[in-house]
Image (cartoon, rainbow, N blue to C red):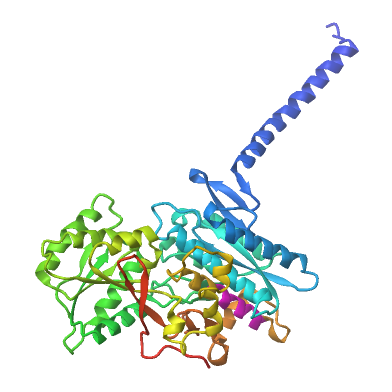
Amino acid sequence: MPRLEWPLHIVRRVVIGAVVLAVLAVGIPLTVHWFGDMRARCGDGVVKQGGGECVGVTDGSYLFAEHLRAVEDKIKTENDRVEGNADKEPYVSVAYMTSFTLTDDDSNSEESVRHELEGAYLAQHRHNRGDLSAAPKIKLLIANMGSNAAHWEHTVGKLIDVKDSDDKLVAVAGLGPSTERTLSALNRLSDHGLALVASTMTATNIKDIEGFVRVSPTNVDEAYAASNYLKRQKVRTAVVVQDDAKTNYYAKTLGDAFTEVFQDNKGHRLVADRMTFDSSVPSAWENELHYMPGQLCDQKPEVVYFAGRGKHLTRFLDAIANRPCQERKFTVMAGDDTSNLTPKQLEHAAESGVRMLYTGLAHPDMWRKDPLHVSGPSAQHFQPGGLLAQWFPNDPRYDGQAVMGHDAVLTAAHGIQMAAGWRGEVTGDAVGRMFHQMDGRKQVAGASGFISFQNQGNPRNKAVPILHLNRKGQSELMEVSAPRGEPPRKQ
């Protein structure tokens, strides 16, 4: 068979063509993948997840929402300063984690999470170069789990990566509301040796997690404080209205606690079985609330204790305002989630004509009302003319969320300072252990009250403000209560 010989110039073309095809076969998929990554990337440490929501961890260089611009800019400036001085003043990182990109599915409002972050920044400033200046310094990271904490796994994974990076993450504060998803996030972070400080998480069944504490009173504490106040006001009869949604730990533990503590052998009683609605059934829960006022007219309780989220409370108040027994006056007592309502929602709720009381987590007037049980140096920053008013003017913070964000990061900072003492190595595990030593003279001098912790992570006999929602939709402080007698005072 004769041998086929190719001219040299044809051989060269064939070889070049084969090489080009091989390069294209590898390069095109890589290019498509690169463009896909670019489309998914929102900024350093932040990516788009399902629905186009940007989630992850930032040092303030990525803006999660326009209303956060002022506080994120300040955090970024302080973080840059801390990094720039790292050769002289070592630092570790604390992340503030919650849902910063909100939808109607969230119990928190834009105002509440913004105020939390403003308070977190205040604590960072005080620790780094303010009245509580200490070492090591703190870089404050902002961690977004997305609406309803839907992308908690991604964000928690990013935080675990930061733990072993140059930024050396040791603690996570904030942590979001009491839900199954945030509980899963807590357990994952704890398993990786990070210290955890919840700011507004109150569900009593979230406890006994390694390295975890909360600066807020539990729902049991809130129920005790509410019951104590109502009994001092000579209230003898009540009814509990509770959200029965299985994932709503907040509502269940709040309703259970009040049911147990209000009834006694001194004539305080519930005049009917617990009335329930289920917010997880979209087509039903508003109807359920609509039919309750007629029953309440028949039962004639002096107080209706509402164990549910604030966004459901407004619908309940609308229903009571249209009750068939207009001649009968009603008082509703609720829990701290009322603080998450927007100013517009609060104003609308006040228009119901029903007397509205609730247990809050904090209130700026607590110090003036009860100076023995709230730290003056911490509380002064929340007063008119204080640092927050100077930094973020025209942003009323009477919801108490800024106080709680501040006290959560202040607790983490206190633990970091204690862990660094006696040449200690500052790790998440070490900071978590320091929480158990925060008692007596080592208690946290919080703007929401003096804070020390029980072994399961709950605060001891935390001060609880009793608030009244006036007709302008503003929260007025009635008194500072406590679950058991007098709140802790300065040592």
Q: Is residue 5 left or right of residue 437?
A: right
Q: Give residue 246's quadrant in the image.
A: bottom left
Q: Of 418 and 158, which appears nearest the observer?
A: 418
Callout count:
0
Q: Residue furthest left?
A: 298
Indicate whether 281 appears above or below 115: above
Indicate whether 172 appears above or below 105: below
Q: Which residues fall within the magenta stretch?
A: 408-419
At x 11%, y 71%, the residue is 299
Q: Position of residue 46 (x, y in %)?
A: 60, 51
* Residue 193 visible, this angle: no
Q: Magenta: predominant secondary structure element? A: helix
Q: Give residue 354's quadrant in the image.
A: bottom left
Magenta-drawn stretch contains 232: no
Q: Position of residue 342 (x, y in %)?
A: 39, 60
At x 48%, y 44%, the residue is 51
Q: Is residue 310 left or right of residue 176?
A: left
Q: Residue furthest front?
A: 385
Q: Position of residue 99 (x, y in %)?
A: 49, 58
Q: Is residue 205 left or right of residue 262?
A: right
Indicate whether 320 appears above or below 458: above
Magenta-drawn stretch contains 415: yes
At x 55%, y 70%, the residue is 388
Q: Residue furthest top?
A: 2
Q: Of 363 and 450, which appears nearest the observer?
A: 363
Indicate whether 345 appears above or below 251: above
At x 90%, y 13%, the residue is 8
Q: Position of residue 137 (x, y in %)?
A: 69, 73
* Residue 174 visible, this angle: yes
Quarter the N terminus occupies: top right
